[in-house]
Image: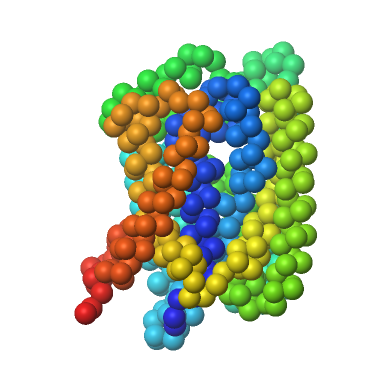
Amino acid sequence: MDRIVSLDVIRGVAVMGILVANLPAFALPGAAYFSPAAAGGTGPADIAVWFANFVLVEGRMRGLFSFLFGASMLIVADRACLSGDDPGQIHIARMAALFAIGCMHLWLVWWGDILSHYALVGLIAWPFRRLSPRPLIAIGIAVTLLGLAMSASGLAMLIAAAARDTPRAIATWNGYAAVFGTPPAATILAEVAAQNGGWLTGVAWRWHHATSPLIGLLVVGPQTLGAILLGMAAYRTGFLTGAWSRARYRRWAVTCLGLSLAGYAALGLLVLHHRFALPWVYGASLVGAEPLRMAGAVGYAALILLLVRPGGRWSAWFAATGRTAFSNYLVTSIAMTCLFGWGFGQFGEWHRAALYGLVPVAWGLMLGWSTSWLHRYRYGPFEWLWRSIARLEWQPLRRST
Protein backbone atom coordinates (compact mmCIF):
# COMPACT_ATOMS: atom_id res chain seq x y z
CA MET A 1 0.00 0.00 0.00
CA ASP A 2 1.32 3.47 -0.91
CA ARG A 3 1.52 6.24 1.64
CA ILE A 4 -1.48 8.55 1.89
CA VAL A 5 -0.15 12.04 1.29
CA SER A 6 -3.06 13.78 3.04
CA LEU A 7 -2.31 11.94 6.29
CA ASP A 8 1.38 12.82 6.07
CA VAL A 9 0.59 16.50 5.50
CA ILE A 10 -1.81 16.64 8.47
CA ARG A 11 0.77 14.87 10.62
CA GLY A 12 3.43 17.36 9.53
CA VAL A 13 1.27 20.33 10.45
CA ALA A 14 0.39 18.67 13.77
CA VAL A 15 4.00 18.06 14.84
CA MET A 16 4.88 21.66 13.97
CA GLY A 17 1.87 22.85 15.96
CA ILE A 18 2.81 20.64 18.90
CA LEU A 19 6.07 22.58 19.16
CA VAL A 20 4.09 25.82 19.56
CA ALA A 21 1.92 24.28 22.27
CA ASN A 22 4.83 22.70 24.15
CA LEU A 23 7.28 25.62 24.23
CA PRO A 24 6.18 26.86 27.69
CA ALA A 25 6.43 23.31 29.03
CA PHE A 26 10.00 22.99 27.75
CA ALA A 27 11.20 26.32 29.07
CA LEU A 28 9.14 27.14 32.17
CA PRO A 29 8.00 25.42 35.39
CA GLY A 30 5.16 22.98 34.80
CA ALA A 31 2.34 25.11 36.21
CA ALA A 32 3.20 27.89 33.73
CA TYR A 33 1.93 25.71 30.89
CA PHE A 34 -1.64 26.52 31.93
CA SER A 35 -1.16 29.78 33.83
CA PRO A 36 1.19 32.71 33.13
CA ALA A 37 0.68 33.69 36.77
CA ALA A 38 2.95 30.78 37.75
CA ALA A 39 6.07 31.83 35.80
CA GLY A 40 7.27 33.29 32.54
CA GLY A 41 6.09 36.86 32.96
CA THR A 42 2.73 38.60 33.02
CA GLY A 43 3.48 41.57 30.78
CA PRO A 44 1.13 42.47 27.92
CA ALA A 45 3.17 40.49 25.37
CA ASP A 46 3.29 37.41 27.62
CA ILE A 47 -0.47 37.49 28.19
CA ALA A 48 -1.09 38.07 24.48
CA VAL A 49 0.91 35.02 23.38
CA TRP A 50 -0.75 32.90 26.08
CA PHE A 51 -4.17 33.97 24.79
CA ALA A 52 -3.22 33.38 21.14
CA ASN A 53 -1.84 29.93 21.94
CA PHE A 54 -4.92 29.05 23.99
CA VAL A 55 -7.36 30.15 21.27
CA LEU A 56 -5.51 28.85 18.21
CA VAL A 57 -3.45 25.84 19.30
CA GLU A 58 -4.05 24.43 22.78
CA GLY A 59 -5.36 20.86 22.63
CA ARG A 60 -6.13 20.87 18.91
CA MET A 61 -2.73 19.58 17.76
CA ARG A 62 -2.90 16.74 20.28
CA GLY A 63 -6.39 16.04 18.96
CA LEU A 64 -5.01 15.83 15.43
CA PHE A 65 -2.32 13.40 16.56
CA SER A 66 -4.96 11.25 18.26
CA PHE A 67 -7.08 11.20 15.09
CA LEU A 68 -4.06 10.18 13.04
CA PHE A 69 -3.02 7.56 15.58
CA GLY A 70 -6.41 5.88 15.16
CA ALA A 71 -6.14 6.03 11.37
CA SER A 72 -2.58 4.64 11.47
CA MET A 73 -3.71 1.68 13.55
CA LEU A 74 -6.14 0.70 10.78
CA ILE A 75 -3.56 1.25 8.04
CA VAL A 76 -1.00 -0.96 9.80
CA ALA A 77 -3.65 -3.65 10.33
CA ASP A 78 -4.70 -3.51 6.67
CA ARG A 79 -1.11 -3.78 5.48
CA ALA A 80 -0.45 -6.72 7.80
CA CYS A 81 -3.45 -8.57 6.40
CA LEU A 82 -2.33 -7.93 2.81
CA SER A 83 1.16 -9.28 3.59
CA GLY A 84 -0.18 -12.34 5.41
CA ASP A 85 1.05 -11.28 8.84
CA ASP A 86 -0.89 -11.38 12.11
CA PRO A 87 -2.16 -7.79 12.61
CA GLY A 88 -2.74 -8.30 16.34
CA GLN A 89 0.79 -9.50 16.94
CA ILE A 90 2.23 -6.62 14.94
CA HIS A 91 0.10 -4.09 16.80
CA ILE A 92 1.09 -5.40 20.24
CA ALA A 93 4.76 -5.37 19.25
CA ARG A 94 4.47 -1.81 17.96
CA MET A 95 2.74 -0.61 21.13
CA ALA A 96 5.28 -2.36 23.35
CA ALA A 97 8.16 -0.70 21.48
CA LEU A 98 6.38 2.66 21.57
CA PHE A 99 5.81 2.31 25.32
CA ALA A 100 9.49 1.56 25.92
CA ILE A 101 10.63 4.54 23.83
CA GLY A 102 8.04 6.74 25.51
CA CYS A 103 9.18 5.79 29.01
CA MET A 104 12.80 6.57 28.10
CA HIS A 105 11.65 9.90 26.69
CA LEU A 106 9.61 10.60 29.82
CA TRP A 107 12.31 10.01 32.41
CA LEU A 108 15.51 10.62 30.46
CA VAL A 109 14.47 13.63 28.37
CA TRP A 110 11.21 15.46 29.16
CA TRP A 111 8.33 15.14 31.61
CA GLY A 112 5.65 15.91 28.98
CA ASP A 113 5.94 12.62 27.04
CA ILE A 114 2.80 11.49 25.23
CA LEU A 115 4.19 8.38 23.48
CA SER A 116 3.83 5.99 26.42
CA HIS A 117 0.26 7.23 26.88
CA TYR A 118 -0.60 6.54 23.24
CA ALA A 119 0.87 3.05 23.53
CA LEU A 120 -1.40 2.18 26.45
CA VAL A 121 -4.51 3.70 24.88
CA GLY A 122 -3.62 2.04 21.58
CA LEU A 123 -3.91 -1.36 23.25
CA ILE A 124 -7.33 -0.46 24.62
CA ALA A 125 -8.50 0.85 21.24
CA TRP A 126 -7.42 -2.21 19.26
CA PRO A 127 -10.59 -4.33 19.77
CA PHE A 128 -12.71 -1.53 18.25
CA ARG A 129 -10.93 -1.58 14.89
CA ARG A 130 -13.50 -3.85 13.17
CA LEU A 131 -16.45 -1.56 13.90
CA SER A 132 -18.05 0.49 11.16
CA PRO A 133 -17.94 4.32 11.29
CA ARG A 134 -21.29 4.87 13.02
CA PRO A 135 -20.61 2.77 16.14
CA LEU A 136 -17.05 4.13 16.23
CA ILE A 137 -18.43 7.66 16.29
CA ALA A 138 -21.06 6.80 18.91
CA ILE A 139 -18.56 5.07 21.22
CA GLY A 140 -15.96 7.78 20.62
CA ILE A 141 -18.41 10.50 21.65
CA ALA A 142 -19.58 8.47 24.66
CA VAL A 143 -16.02 7.92 25.88
CA THR A 144 -15.25 11.61 25.37
CA LEU A 145 -18.30 12.53 27.45
CA LEU A 146 -17.09 10.15 30.14
CA GLY A 147 -13.78 12.00 30.22
CA LEU A 148 -15.64 15.29 30.36
CA ALA A 149 -17.69 14.03 33.33
CA MET A 150 -14.49 12.98 35.11
CA SER A 151 -12.96 16.42 34.56
CA ALA A 152 -16.17 18.08 35.77
CA SER A 153 -16.09 16.01 38.96
CA GLY A 154 -12.52 17.18 39.47
CA LEU A 155 -13.70 20.77 39.14
CA ALA A 156 -16.41 20.13 41.73
CA MET A 157 -13.79 18.76 44.12
CA LEU A 158 -11.62 21.81 43.54
CA ILE A 159 -14.47 24.23 44.21
CA ALA A 160 -15.43 22.32 47.35
CA ALA A 161 -11.83 22.61 48.59
CA ALA A 162 -11.62 26.35 47.91
CA ALA A 163 -12.25 27.27 51.55
CA ARG A 164 -9.15 25.28 52.57
CA ASP A 165 -10.62 24.85 56.03
CA THR A 166 -9.49 21.24 56.59
CA PRO A 167 -6.20 19.44 56.01
CA ARG A 168 -7.86 17.41 53.25
CA ALA A 169 -9.17 20.54 51.52
CA ILE A 170 -5.75 22.17 51.75
CA ALA A 171 -4.08 19.10 50.24
CA THR A 172 -6.65 18.96 47.40
CA TRP A 173 -6.26 22.65 46.62
CA ASN A 174 -2.46 22.51 46.68
CA GLY A 175 -2.45 19.44 44.45
CA TYR A 176 -4.45 21.26 41.79
CA ALA A 177 -2.41 24.44 42.23
CA ALA A 178 0.81 22.55 41.51
CA VAL A 179 -0.43 21.95 37.94
CA PHE A 180 -3.00 24.65 37.14
CA GLY A 181 -2.29 27.46 39.59
CA THR A 182 0.57 29.22 41.30
CA PRO A 183 2.71 26.85 43.38
CA PRO A 184 4.77 28.23 46.29
CA ALA A 185 7.90 30.12 45.26
CA ALA A 186 10.08 27.44 46.87
CA THR A 187 8.50 24.78 44.64
CA ILE A 188 9.13 26.87 41.52
CA LEU A 189 12.74 27.54 42.51
CA ALA A 190 13.36 23.85 43.24
CA GLU A 191 12.10 22.86 39.79
CA VAL A 192 14.22 25.53 38.08
CA ALA A 193 17.31 24.40 39.98
CA ALA A 194 16.67 20.74 39.14
CA GLN A 195 16.20 21.38 35.41
CA ASN A 196 19.30 23.58 35.19
CA GLY A 197 21.38 21.35 37.43
CA GLY A 198 22.65 18.91 34.84
CA TRP A 199 21.18 15.93 33.03
CA LEU A 200 21.35 13.46 35.94
CA THR A 201 19.75 15.99 38.27
CA GLY A 202 16.92 16.43 35.77
CA VAL A 203 16.49 12.67 35.49
CA ALA A 204 16.21 12.37 39.26
CA TRP A 205 13.65 15.20 39.38
CA ARG A 206 11.51 13.60 36.64
CA TRP A 207 11.69 10.22 38.36
CA HIS A 208 10.13 11.70 41.48
CA HIS A 209 7.81 14.30 39.96
CA ALA A 210 6.75 13.29 36.42
CA THR A 211 3.29 11.74 36.12
CA SER A 212 3.53 8.01 35.49
CA PRO A 213 1.92 6.64 32.30
CA LEU A 214 -0.64 4.69 34.35
CA ILE A 215 -1.79 7.81 36.20
CA GLY A 216 -1.97 9.68 32.92
CA LEU A 217 -4.11 6.89 31.51
CA LEU A 218 -6.65 7.41 34.30
CA VAL A 219 -6.67 11.19 33.97
CA VAL A 220 -6.80 11.78 30.20
CA GLY A 221 -7.21 8.26 28.83
CA PRO A 222 -10.92 8.66 27.97
CA GLN A 223 -10.28 11.84 25.98
CA THR A 224 -7.46 10.18 24.03
CA LEU A 225 -9.43 6.98 23.42
CA GLY A 226 -12.42 8.97 22.19
CA ALA A 227 -10.27 10.89 19.72
CA ILE A 228 -8.57 7.71 18.48
CA LEU A 229 -11.93 6.04 17.83
CA LEU A 230 -13.17 9.13 16.00
CA GLY A 231 -9.95 9.06 13.98
CA MET A 232 -10.70 5.47 12.97
CA ALA A 233 -14.15 6.57 11.83
CA ALA A 234 -12.68 9.56 9.97
CA TYR A 235 -10.35 7.22 8.10
CA ARG A 236 -13.06 4.69 7.25
CA THR A 237 -15.37 7.42 5.91
CA GLY A 238 -12.64 8.88 3.70
CA PHE A 239 -12.47 12.16 5.62
CA LEU A 240 -8.75 11.87 6.42
CA THR A 241 -7.78 10.55 3.01
CA GLY A 242 -9.15 13.48 1.01
CA ALA A 243 -12.05 11.52 -0.46
CA TRP A 244 -14.74 14.09 0.36
CA SER A 245 -15.79 16.95 -1.89
CA ARG A 246 -14.18 20.35 -1.39
CA ALA A 247 -17.57 21.86 -0.56
CA ARG A 248 -18.06 19.32 2.21
CA TYR A 249 -14.60 19.95 3.66
CA ARG A 250 -15.28 23.68 3.51
CA ARG A 251 -18.51 23.33 5.49
CA TRP A 252 -16.84 21.22 8.16
CA ALA A 253 -13.85 23.57 8.40
CA VAL A 254 -16.01 26.70 8.76
CA THR A 255 -18.45 25.12 11.21
CA CYS A 256 -15.97 23.31 13.45
CA LEU A 257 -13.31 26.01 13.50
CA GLY A 258 -15.89 28.72 14.01
CA LEU A 259 -17.30 26.89 17.02
CA SER A 260 -13.89 25.97 18.44
CA LEU A 261 -12.15 29.32 18.03
CA ALA A 262 -15.12 31.32 19.34
CA GLY A 263 -15.52 28.99 22.31
CA TYR A 264 -11.83 29.04 23.21
CA ALA A 265 -11.77 32.82 22.89
CA ALA A 266 -14.72 33.11 25.30
CA LEU A 267 -13.05 30.76 27.78
CA GLY A 268 -9.76 32.62 27.51
CA LEU A 269 -11.46 35.94 28.18
CA LEU A 270 -13.15 34.46 31.26
CA VAL A 271 -9.81 33.24 32.59
CA LEU A 272 -8.30 36.69 31.98
CA HIS A 273 -11.26 38.38 33.66
CA HIS A 274 -10.79 36.22 36.75
CA ARG A 275 -7.00 36.86 36.73
CA PHE A 276 -6.03 33.23 36.28
CA ALA A 277 -7.85 32.08 39.39
CA LEU A 278 -7.25 28.36 39.87
CA PRO A 279 -10.84 27.07 39.35
CA TRP A 280 -11.20 29.12 36.18
CA VAL A 281 -7.90 27.89 34.70
CA TYR A 282 -8.78 24.26 35.44
CA GLY A 283 -12.41 24.65 34.33
CA ALA A 284 -11.50 26.34 31.06
CA SER A 285 -8.63 23.99 30.18
CA LEU A 286 -10.12 20.62 31.10
CA VAL A 287 -13.90 21.08 31.20
CA GLY A 288 -15.07 23.89 28.95
CA ALA A 289 -12.46 23.25 26.27
CA GLU A 290 -13.01 19.50 25.91
CA PRO A 291 -15.82 19.48 23.30
CA LEU A 292 -14.24 22.50 21.60
CA ARG A 293 -10.93 20.65 21.34
CA MET A 294 -12.46 17.83 19.33
CA ALA A 295 -14.35 20.22 17.07
CA GLY A 296 -11.18 22.22 16.49
CA ALA A 297 -9.14 19.15 15.57
CA VAL A 298 -11.74 18.15 12.98
CA GLY A 299 -11.89 21.70 11.67
CA TYR A 300 -8.13 22.00 11.31
CA ALA A 301 -7.97 18.63 9.54
CA ALA A 302 -10.66 19.77 7.09
CA LEU A 303 -8.83 23.06 6.48
CA ILE A 304 -5.50 21.31 5.87
CA LEU A 305 -7.14 18.91 3.43
CA LEU A 306 -8.57 21.88 1.54
CA LEU A 307 -5.07 23.33 1.20
CA VAL A 308 -3.25 20.12 0.21
CA ARG A 309 -1.99 20.19 -3.37
CA PRO A 310 -0.62 16.76 -4.38
CA GLY A 311 2.69 17.29 -6.12
CA GLY A 312 3.04 20.84 -4.82
CA ARG A 313 6.27 21.95 -3.20
CA TRP A 314 4.73 22.97 0.12
CA SER A 315 2.65 19.82 0.33
CA ALA A 316 5.78 17.76 -0.29
CA TRP A 317 7.68 19.56 2.48
CA PHE A 318 4.87 19.16 4.99
CA ALA A 319 4.38 15.52 3.97
CA ALA A 320 8.09 14.83 4.55
CA THR A 321 7.83 16.47 7.98
CA GLY A 322 4.83 14.25 8.69
CA ARG A 323 6.62 11.11 7.58
CA THR A 324 9.37 11.93 10.09
CA ALA A 325 6.97 13.26 12.76
CA PHE A 326 8.14 10.73 15.35
CA SER A 327 11.75 11.85 14.90
CA ASN A 328 10.76 15.52 14.81
CA TYR A 329 8.88 15.13 18.08
CA LEU A 330 11.76 13.42 19.88
CA VAL A 331 14.54 15.57 18.41
CA THR A 332 12.57 18.69 19.39
CA SER A 333 12.43 17.41 22.98
CA ILE A 334 16.17 16.73 23.04
CA ALA A 335 17.05 20.11 21.50
CA MET A 336 14.70 22.13 23.71
CA THR A 337 15.70 20.42 26.95
CA CYS A 338 19.32 20.99 25.98
CA LEU A 339 18.68 24.70 25.52
CA PHE A 340 16.32 24.99 28.48
CA GLY A 341 18.04 22.76 30.97
CA TRP A 342 21.04 20.46 31.07
CA GLY A 343 22.91 22.03 28.14
CA PHE A 344 22.67 25.81 28.39
CA GLY A 345 20.81 26.21 31.69
CA GLN A 346 18.10 28.52 30.36
CA PHE A 347 15.14 26.88 32.12
CA GLY A 348 12.97 29.54 33.74
CA GLU A 349 15.10 32.38 32.32
CA TRP A 350 13.01 33.46 29.31
CA HIS A 351 9.76 35.36 29.25
CA ARG A 352 6.88 33.55 27.59
CA ALA A 353 6.68 35.97 24.66
CA ALA A 354 10.38 35.55 23.84
CA LEU A 355 9.99 31.78 23.49
CA TYR A 356 7.97 32.10 20.31
CA GLY A 357 10.89 33.65 18.48
CA LEU A 358 12.20 30.07 18.27
CA VAL A 359 9.18 28.90 16.27
CA PRO A 360 10.18 30.00 12.74
CA VAL A 361 13.70 28.67 13.26
CA ALA A 362 12.45 25.29 14.46
CA TRP A 363 9.84 25.06 11.71
CA GLY A 364 12.44 25.82 9.04
CA LEU A 365 14.73 23.12 10.40
CA MET A 366 11.88 20.58 10.51
CA LEU A 367 10.86 21.23 6.92
CA GLY A 368 14.44 21.31 5.64
CA TRP A 369 16.02 18.29 7.31
CA SER A 370 12.96 16.05 6.85
CA THR A 371 12.91 16.55 3.09
CA SER A 372 16.67 16.15 2.75
CA TRP A 373 16.76 13.03 4.96
CA LEU A 374 14.01 11.23 3.03
CA HIS A 375 15.86 11.71 -0.24
CA ARG A 376 18.43 9.23 1.11
CA TYR A 377 16.59 7.12 3.68
CA ARG A 378 13.33 5.19 3.88
CA TYR A 379 12.29 6.38 7.34
CA GLY A 380 13.18 8.99 9.90
CA PRO A 381 15.87 7.81 12.37
CA PHE A 382 13.46 7.23 15.25
CA GLU A 383 10.80 5.76 12.94
CA TRP A 384 13.47 3.28 11.87
CA LEU A 385 14.37 2.54 15.50
CA TRP A 386 10.70 1.98 16.44
CA ARG A 387 10.20 -0.31 13.47
CA SER A 388 13.38 -2.27 14.24
CA ILE A 389 12.55 -2.74 17.93
CA ALA A 390 8.99 -3.83 17.14
CA ARG A 391 10.21 -6.41 14.59
CA LEU A 392 13.24 -7.48 16.69
CA GLU A 393 15.59 -7.05 13.75
CA TRP A 394 17.33 -4.14 12.10
CA GLN A 395 15.27 -2.80 9.22
CA PRO A 396 16.79 -1.50 5.97
CA LEU A 397 17.22 2.25 6.27
CA ARG A 398 19.08 3.60 3.24
CA ARG A 399 17.17 3.80 0.01
CA SER A 400 18.42 1.45 -2.71
CA THR A 401 20.03 3.09 -5.72
Which quadrant would residue 162 be assigned to in this image?
Answer: top right
Q: Residue at x 60, y 21 (%)?
A: 43
Front-most of residues 58 and 117? 58
Residue 337 seen by the camera: yes
Q: Residue at x 51, y 48 (%)?
A: 18
* Residue 157 in sight from this viewpoint: no
From the viewer's side, name the closer residue of 277 and 258. Answer: 258
Against 240, residue 177 (above or below) is: above
Residues 138 and 256: in front is 256
Q: Quadrant of the C terminus?
A: bottom left
**Quadrant for the N terminus in the image:** bottom left
Q: Quadrant of residue 204?
A: top left
x and y percentages locating residue 108 in the rendered image: 33, 40
In x, y percent, where is residue 388?
Answer: 29, 66
Colouring style: rainbow
In the rendered image, residue 92, in percent from the top left (x then y), is placed at: 42, 66
Left-right relation of 317 to 400: right
**Residue at left offset 54%, top offset 30%:** 353
